Structure formats: C-alpha cells, structure tokens
Amino acid sequence: MKILITGIAGFIGSRLAEFFKKLLPDVQITGIDNLSRRGSETNIPFLKSLGCTFIHGDIRVKDDVEELPDADWIIDCAANPSVLAGLNGGTSQLVQHNLSGTLNLLEKCRKTKAGFILLSTSRVYSINHLNALPLLETPTRFELDRTQPFPAGFTSRGVTEDFPTTAPVSIYGATKIASEVMALEYAMTFDFPVWVNRCGVIAGPGQFGKIDQGIFSFWIYNWLLGKPLSFIGYGGEGKQVRDLMHPEDLGLLLLKQLSYGKNDNKKPWILNAGGGLEGSFSLRELNDYCKNRFKNEKIIGSEKITRPFDLPFYATDNTLAHQAWDWRPTKTGIEILDEIANWAEGNRERITKSFG
C-alpha cells in the first residue's frame, strides 16, 4: 500500500507515519510539509529513519500537489488548527491552508482515484449550542445535569455526529466544514472513497506543546518549565472540560478505514473520534495532575472573562465509531498524560526551544 500524508512533519502526521510503519511492514509512505510550524523540521530525521520519503512543499500550491507521487490513499493532516486563527487578519491565509489545500488534494484523488481521509475537528460543532448544554458545577469541573433533557445530537456520553454545526463555529471550524462538504461531494461525483473523522484533542509524547494543538501538552510543558499559567473564562476557576485521544488510537481507526476502502451505506462517511467522557479532564483536574506529578506548588492566574470561542464542556460520543468499526480508544486519559510528562522530562531542552 502507498500512503501520502500531508503535514507529515507535524505531530499527528509524524506519529501516524510511525504507527503505520510498525503495523504495515510493506507500506510505502510519502509525506509533504511546508515546515511553517516552528519545530516541525526536527521531525524530518525521524521520518527518514522510518523509511518515509519527505517532500518539502505546500499543498496550497497546485503544482506542488500535482507533482506528488501517486498513492492508494491520501491522509490530510495539514491544517492551521487554531480556533483563534483569522481573528486579527489572515483569514485568506487560513482559508488557503484549510480549504484550498484540501481542494488541491481532492483534485489529485479525482485524477488518480486515490482514497481520501480528512482529519476534521470537533470545532465544527456550534459554539452557542455547546454553551447551552445543561451543566452542573462541582468543586473540580462542570458535569452534565442528567436531570435536564439533552439537546438534539447530545447524549449522556457526549457529542454525536448529529449535533448542530450551525454558526458560530469560528472561521477555523467553518473552513473544516467546507472541506468536509467538498470531500463528500468529490467522493459522490467522482467515485473514490472518502472518510471524514471529526477529532477531539489529540495528545501524546513528542507534541510541540503549542496551545493550538490542545491544552494538555501545553499545560504540562509550561508547568514543568516554570512558566506562568492562568485559568481563563467561566469564572476563572478552570472547570471547563475536554477529552483527549492518543494518536495511536486514531491510527487504529484509520487502519480499519484504509482496509475497507469503498464508500457504501454500510459505513458512516463522517465519524466523531475522541477520548470520550471517561477520557476527559477539567483544566483544574489537569492542574492537579501536574501538581502531584511534579511535586511542587505553582500560583495559577485567574481571568474571569470568557472569550468568544471558549467552551465549558466537550466530550466525544464514540458510539457510531464503535458500532461501525468496532473502535474505541484503548489508552486512558491518565496514561496519555503520563506519556506526555515522561517525554517532557526527558526532553526538557527540546521543549524549552519549542517555547522560545
């Protein structure tokens, strides 16, 4: 099998390449990355040691994509992942990264009949609807108020694929919705397989620790390096909740999709994939983990004003993925945090450089 991974020098792209190489000994992996994210260049020697072919290019550039070698599958990991992107200008660049680049890849799939896997995001779901969830406040987190009716698309396990995607979702979220729609239209019009996976926070060892990659590595690295941290929004108490998923668990889902290949009515084309309610932490609980792990005290700032794109609670309902693919996360949230902390302690110099 020949796989092309975009954004291969990033955290998710490089970890998927490593995972596929371990489980698919005959796989040929080619990757493209424009190396715009600081630190991504450090993954190139690692990728080459795996036997991957690395191409320095940009999927926004049509010629760069057309010149890529043909593959059986294209896995699109390339994106500007920040929900805050475009707020201070640069909207056009965000759209080029997250939509125009995907369209160039879909054109390549049209011409070569390659299958296409889009890594989308939980940020396609409506901010207003998520902020309206029935919640209770406990000493450490927001919890679901199970005495109240849940809105459409939400269960006691979390957000399903039927949850509203109406605006606002952020400009970032809008680019991913648009990419999803175009991918499905291309699949139906030009008859090649497409899978869309709406991922929650993906976290694990080797992450750069930037805030747009999710809060977990960012918080652990900053705690380890003694840098200031603050609870922001919702009263400044750190009770907002997120789930997290390991890239290897994402890889297990993708392996099933790669092996199935075709699109039909037996498998859903759009899936949620995340750590689930059992793999979730509030910011306060994450901070308590760091306090216990690193055995020191730290003053955490508090900013009570809630920002426009903040959310009080997000957990993934993976029921559809389990029913369709017999998939669910295998690594617990604590196991993932331990892996991140262990890696950070052994790579202090590297994460120091990453934070500048």
Image (cartoon, rainbow, N blue to C red):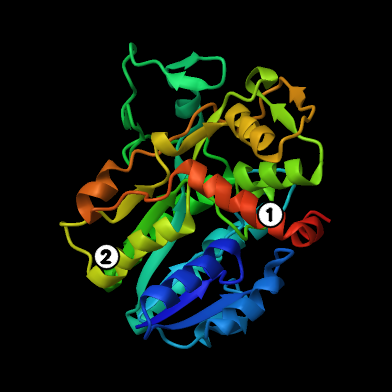
90 and 10: which is toward the camera: 10
- From where the camera sits, is residue 96 visible? yes
Is label 2 in a helix, a strand or a loop?
helix
Left or right, 317 with respect to 103, comes to left
Q: Which residue is mark 2?
A: 188
Badge 1 local density, few (<14 within 10 Å), some, or many (20+)?
many
Q: In the rendering, at what x and y percent does residue 135 appear?
A: 45, 17
Q: Residue furthest top?
A: 147
Q: Which disc number belongs to residue 344?
A: 1
Q: In the rendering, at what x and y percent does residue 202 appear?
A: 51, 51
Q: In the rendering, at what x and y percent does residue 35 appear?
A: 68, 71
- From where the camera sits, is residue 106 visible? no
Left or right, 189 with respect to 346, comes to left
Badge 2 local density, few (<14 within 10 Å), some, or many (20+)?
few
Q: In the rendering, at what x and y percent does residue 234 appear?
A: 63, 20
Q: Residue at x 37, y 76 (%)?
A: 73
Quadrant in the picture for residue 153: top left
Q: Specify the amino acid type for callout 1.
A: Ala
Q: Residue furthest front?
A: 295
Q: Residue at x 48, y 58 (%)?
A: 247
Q: Quadrant of the C terminus?
A: bottom right
Mark before the other along the chain sequence, 1 or 2: 2
Q: Specify the amino acid type for callout 2.
A: Met
Give the alpha-carbon distance from disc 1 to disc 2, as whole Å: 44 Å
- Looking at the image, residue 184 lies above or below residue 63: above
173 and 141: which is toward the camera: 141
80 and 14: which is toward the camera: 14
